[in-house]
Amino acid sequence: MLRRLCLFTTLLAIAGCEPANEASNSAASASTQAANAAVAKAYNLGDQQALQDAQRGFIAKPSGQVRNEQGVVIWDFDSFNFLHGNAPDTVNPSLWRQAVLNNQVGLFKVSEGIWQLRGFDLANMTLIQGATGWIVIDPLTSRETAAFAWAFAREHLGEQPVSAMIFTHSHVDHFGGALGILSAEDARAQQTPIIAPEGFMAEATSENLLMGLAMSRRASFMYGQRLPRSATGLVDNGLGKAVAFGRAGILPPTVLINEAAQPLTVDGVEFIFHSMPGAEAPAELTFSLPEHKAFAGAEMVSQTLHNLYTLRGAKVRDARLWSEHIQQMLHYAEQAEVLFNQHHWPVWGTANIQQFLTAQRDVYRFLHDQTVRGMNAGLTAPEIAEQLKLPASLDQQMAVHGYYGTLKHNVRAIYQFYLGWFDANPANLDPLPPVAAAEKYLALAGGSEALLSQAQQAYDAGDYRWAAELGKHLVYADRDNQAARELQAKAFEQLGYQAEGTPWRNFYLSGAYELRHGLPEQPFSPAMMLDMLRHTDTREFLASMATRLDAEAAADKNLRVVLNFTDSGERYLLWLENAVLHNRMLATEETIEPDAQLSLTKDFFLQMVIGKAGAAALLTSDEVSIDGSVLKLGEFFGLLDKPDGRFPIVTRP
């Protein structure tokens, strides 16, 4: 009777995919070997200073695996043990260097009173010694990895309680593991300060809710979720090794940071918090530790160029504001002797910190200003991206290389930020959709064999971008053409092997994997998000429900349903009008005569949302009562789609 409603958060919903299997990869071609050799020659990749910094303060290293309650592997500390020696032909040598640096895993002492756990998840967990216990900063992505890291730290540093928790920003890899360290009950009972930037809760719980299904599918490509961990597969994710696809939760903040400089004493430690919203994350903070002569940059800066647009899909970020925030950081950190961030390894020495921050500031401003310059000269985003190069003074600093956010896709992001999708050429106002255009290109080329021959010639010449372009039309128009699929996969592989950026490499190699192995066998599942969904505003759920409406089926429907949440006292009217699903909160005393009224707890509603409670449970549960027409209620929910997130990307339906 009731179709399942699914909500997803990008980093975690893709855990429903099957484990990666070894793929039938191609070897690196002569052209790829030459391109990678040129990279090795262009940069001083053998400089040991970064490796020494990444290893500095090492205390202990974990091994083995982290598993969830069902025995599923959430994290494997040994899976990247192949990362040693010189770069193989199948990995860009600059990326190989970053992958090796990110593989310096363990517990590290940053400076007196400050420690970091690195390589337990995509992000770092930082511990600061307080007067009565540990101040925990950013408890990773998942409950499982956070609990393991917390136990590992206490094993080596001693048993102490959590005296405070700080979330630097609203991305799930910086708060999702909170409940693995501190339960909500203990946080309330102990009145543990939970500190976060203003707007954190709304941003953290609503990010990707509307577009979560599409973003999750794309994230499986961006983070290489299906790829084997090998020199022909996943080697790194730029910001860290991988994403921990476990159970995520959240703790509501008790203290909000909303000022440019907000002093606060936390468990006897003097902090000066700095609010820096609207750039790397909608809600973000950094902070100074004057007594420690330390500055924490959160994710505003890291040992890579970051994303102005993330390939999994997200709103474009403001490059100019980002640069301006880092300019402020230069001032805040002018006395600091160590800069530690929530990804990668720290920077030590006041002069080194200022140089590092200056390069970070300037790379975002350079991209912004020069892209806008190109736009005002009439260039399109692809044209600007093709010709724009970093000046040598920035290009030779590896910490601003595009391991996570590449120059080319960041240029396109800035173009989109200001001018949107349209390049002003009238021919692009109403272009043919991809499959229709591909069929016409195929006919123009003289059929599949002729176009395949042209694509093969491009591949043999090392022109993999053109081979992939031709292969795209071939596969779109004739998706069962195995020769076309294999050639496209091989072109993607060579592009991936040459890519310096991990999102590009992972997208290319994931595309090749799916061309050979097909779509994921398992649908995406949001069940591991239940702990976080409990804190999501009900209106966000209802807005997401509206995007599932089958407009054609609902075209002549005028149904009215009341949702009555018995635990929170909230009441909502949902109604269909003009093939749109509307909702509004009802006042307590307001009288409505709907077609049906559904009374249930919010928790049971969440069970429906994640698919754990279906029609039978709805009709038989003691937590639910239905007034009015059961048939009308079933008809209403039957108008909502239940996509499983396995739509094709490199082929079309």
Image (cartoon, rainbow, N blue to C red):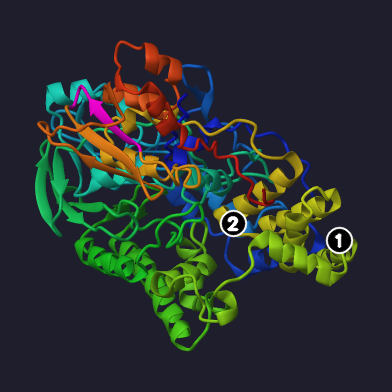
Q: Residue at x 52, y 65 (%)?
A: 409
Q: Nearer the viewer, residue 390 or 429?
A: 429
Label 2 sits on a secondary structure element that is helix
Single out the mark in the foreground, 1 or 2.
1
Q: Is residue 537 at all visible to an observer of this figure?
A: no
From the viewer's perspective, is 628 left or right of 413?
A: left
Res. 504 mark: 2
Separation (CA) of disc 1 from disc 2:
28 Å
556 left or right, relative to 648: left
Rendered residue at 41%/71% (across/down): 363
> Along the line of sight, which residue is nearer the eye, 376 or 295?
376
In the image, which residues are magenta?
559-568
Give the x, y percent position of residue 238.
Answer: 51, 51
Please, is residue 423 above or below residue 143 in the view?
A: below
Dot 2, how many residues are within 10 Å of its Cα: few (below 14), some (14-19), or many (20+)? many
Q: Residue furthest bottom?
A: 377
- Identified by mark 2, the residue type is Trp
Task: Give yes or no for residue 270 being in the magenta stretch.
Answer: no
- Which of the 4 image quadrants contains residue 516? top right
Q: Residue 553's spot in the image, x, y percent?
A: 49, 42
- Badges 1 and 2: C-beta atoms under 8 Å apart? no
Write down the residue under mark 1. 448
Q: Is residue 350 left or right of residue 332?
A: right
